[in-house]
Image: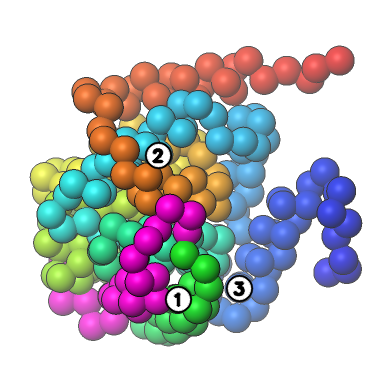
Amino acid sequence: MGEIPESHPRRSSLLARQKLVDAAAEGLLADSAMIAHGRGEAFDYLLGEQTSDSARSAIREASARLLTAERPVISVNGNTVVLAGEDLIRVAAVVGCPIEVNLYYRTPERIARLLTRLAEQRASVAGGPAPDGWSEDWAKAVSSVALLGDGADGSIEGLEGARAICCTNGIGSADIVLVPLEDGDRCEALVEMGKQVVVIDLNPLSRTSRMATVTIVDEVTRAAAALVDEVVSGHAAQGDWDNRAALSEALDIIAGASAGE
Ligand code: PTJ
């Protein structure tokens, strides 16, 4: 792809697409990853391609819950690693939790490639600057982030086949799972197991969005960046979290989208 001018109105969208095109060529993505991304883009367009106040509130709630959990885990798939891997490693470093590669379309090759990509991202993040407000040893915190997914030995109750597979020391024993771009069945199964499930999903109508404990209706790249700031700030939870209200607010934004002048 040629150089995209800084002023191009669709610059970030084009860059994200190119990242996915390159990642697909490297065998990191599911065959349907582009379709999933396209559906997300359509919702993002209607949401104004920005983090709403309501999504920001969900990000704050997610942060507070991750920070106070006993065994938090971040579960990532192909699209998430490619679009938001580095910021999720920053989140994991601050929270002090592992990252598990857990795929909808699981193959040992993709698990291995995604773990390699995450290890590269971890090294790059460890060698880079700490987030504003972080005062401890950044390289040490980042290097301590465990990357799980290989040799998965556990299973998610209520699911069948490869989609049930998980790591016992990751999702299997977690009390809260942050899982961007999750599917509805697995989200429901995790909730049934008594876990809190935080999802990032641009579609406020998806089963995943409706099943989750906390739904962040936002683009995964923007949400992960905002989550870094929140976990470093360490704000407390906001009391009773009304997830349905958060989803309604996202739908109100979509319903109010207009063609303007
Ligand atoms: O890497 P794998 O094998 O785990 O497969 C990953 C995909 C995403 C292909 C798989 O999980 C899948 O098919 O997902 P779905 O069921 O299409 O759901 C994707 C959801 O994520 C949809 O509701 C989209 O609106 C949403 N979505 C897509 N791109 C983004 C997004 N949400 C936030 N940020 C995005 N960039």
Closer to the camera in the image, 215 or 206: 215
Spatial CA distance of label 3 from label 2 is 27 Å
Label 1: how many Cα within 10 Å (few below 14, some 14–19, many 20+) = many
Predominant SS along the magenta part:
loop
Residue 50: % across, % down: 62, 36
118 shown above or below 39: below
Q: Which amino acid lies under the numbered mark 3 shown in the image of this protein?
A: Ala
Closer to the camera in the image, 165 or 181: 181
Label 2: how many Cα within 10 Å (few below 14, some 14–19, many 20+) = many
Residue at which label 3 appears? 23
Nearest to the eye among marks 3 and 2: give it.
2
Q: Which amino acid lies under the numbered mark 1 shown in the image of this protein?
A: Ala
Q: In the figure, is residue 214 to the left or right of 119?
A: left
Tell whether label 1 touches label 2 (CB within 8 Å).
no
The answer to if 152 sits in the magenta stretch is yes
Residue at which label 1 appears? 126
Give the mark nearer the N terminus: 3 vs 2. Answer: 3
Nearest to the eye among marks 2 and 1: give it.
1
Range of the magenta residues? 131-155
Determine whether the residue tagged by mark 2 lies in a helix, strand or loop.
helix
Assign the N terminus to one quadrant of the image. bottom right
The answer to which quarter of the image holds residue 17 is bottom right
Residue 211: % across, % down: 29, 36
Residue at which label 2 appears? 59
